[in-house]
Amino acid sequence: MSLDFSTKRMRATTVAIPDPGLLQRFLSASGPTSAFIRRGEGFVALGEVARFETDYPDAADVWWAEVADHIDHDSELPGAYGTSPLAVGSFTFDPDRSEERSVLVVPEVVIGTRGGQSWMTTIGPRSRSLELPPSGERLVAPTHLDLLEGSMSERIWMDIVGEVVALIRTGEVDKVVLARDLVVKAGGPLDARWLVNRLVNRYPTCWTYLVDGLVGATPELLIRRQGGLATSRVLAGTVSLDPQNTDSLVKAAELATSSKDVAEHEFAVESVARALEPYCSAMNVPESPSILRLPNVLHLSTDITGVTDPGSSALALAAALHPSAAVCGTPTFAARDVISELESMDRGRYAGPVGWVDSFGDGEWAIALRGGQIKPETPEQIQLFAGCGLVADSDPAAELAETKAKFLPMLQALGLAD
């Protein structure tokens, strides 16, 4: 829906509500619905007041600033983080080489909880009911699932890994993040709410997201802006973890001392710090990474923080940071060219920013990893994605194993893995 901002204003109302319980219960089986949840906190969003499709986050940021300027907001929680009117979006990895478009949506209703405070925000050209919408609609489990090969076979993909590693060894590029896909086809339309519920329960420390058919649970926060403080979590360097058969402490030591993984992580940290620096008056970049443990993998992790320019919104910061070396490579332009030439698929919005921005410019944008895309024209199937960072001493078989570990969250959510 387009809005004539010269004549049309919208009213938003935020009220405090009792603890709503599991947020995912409010996801709608019909009509637009979104989610962004971690550790039981976050929000679900229902309906659509306005929608902006674009190729670039910068354009979306300008559009949202204009929309927000035309919203009159009454709030019982003035100034509370994330409770003002917001826009939810996801952006393509490489808009110049994708048939997908980026999208930013202004929802009609937002139900959220954070830090012991719960709220509901309604927005639209007219006043709306302040009653909580109904919850508990029956989730539909996927049935008759077939796991299909994606854009290429495992053997062909490993051959391409070898080609990329050879390029890296010539010095043409330092790091390339190469991805592959799988397709899961069901006997009927897939219920994204089912996937969200399974992911929230199994991967509570990740950011579970649902935006316009893009669904997943990512461990990587591209940027959070809260007041004057920005935080970015960099993940690069991975080892698979099988808790039944492997000692996680041994695996953690192996990861921390792996020259390949440490080099990959350093490239990613440097790229984020360099991109964030122009927007910060002060920054803290830890000298060495920590280990982030998830049920299926261990990651090298670094949290970068900075004091930001108040004029830079969370969405503008996400635009400046994307794509980082963690999802593209370095140098960025050279790595993106290699991906375009050799990866042989359209990533769409996989590995792009996914999240939200409010009317104050605060917000959270994660990187759309460990997920997949359900398209309106094929609602009975989902395209899953997984990638890994390649450096000079990468081994094709090991990289293939890493992608299999990264497919696991979505395969578990679908019921295709334990």
Image (tube, rainbow, N blue to C red):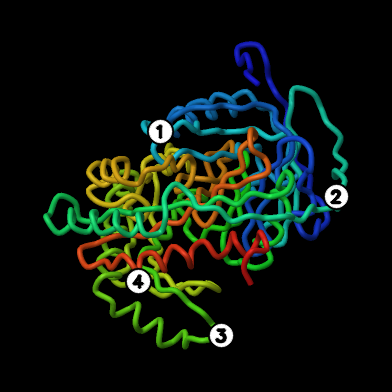
Q: Position of residue 101 (x, y in %)?
A: 50, 31
Residue 137, numbered circle:
2
Q: Secondary structure at mark 2?
A: loop
Nearer to me, 120 or 333:
333
Q: Residues within 10 Å of mark 1 (few under 14, many from 20)?
A: some
Viewer-side label of 1, 4: 1
Q: Residues within 10 Å of mark 2 (few under 14, many from 20)?
A: few
- Of the two numbered discs 2 and 1 on the same chain, state the one appearing first in sequence: 1
Give the distance between the C-alpha atoms of the residues marked 2 and 1, in whole angstroms: 36 Å
Q: Is residue 167 above or below residue 358?
A: below
Q: Which residue is mark 1?
A: 95
Q: Amino acid at mark 4?
A: Pro
- Of the two numbered discs 2 and 4 on the same chain, state the one appearing first in sequence: 2
Q: Which residue is mark 3?
A: 244
Q: Can residue 366 be seen at all in this image of the molecule?
A: no
Q: Amino acid at mark 1?
A: Pro
- Of the two numbered discs 3 and 1 on the same chain, state the one appearing first in sequence: 1
Q: Secondary structure at mark 3?
A: loop
- The quadrant holding residue 234 is bottom left
Tell me whether circle 2 and circle 4 mark residues in contact (CB < 8 Å). no
Q: Position of residue 96 (x, y in %)?
A: 36, 31
Viewer-side label of 2, 4: 2
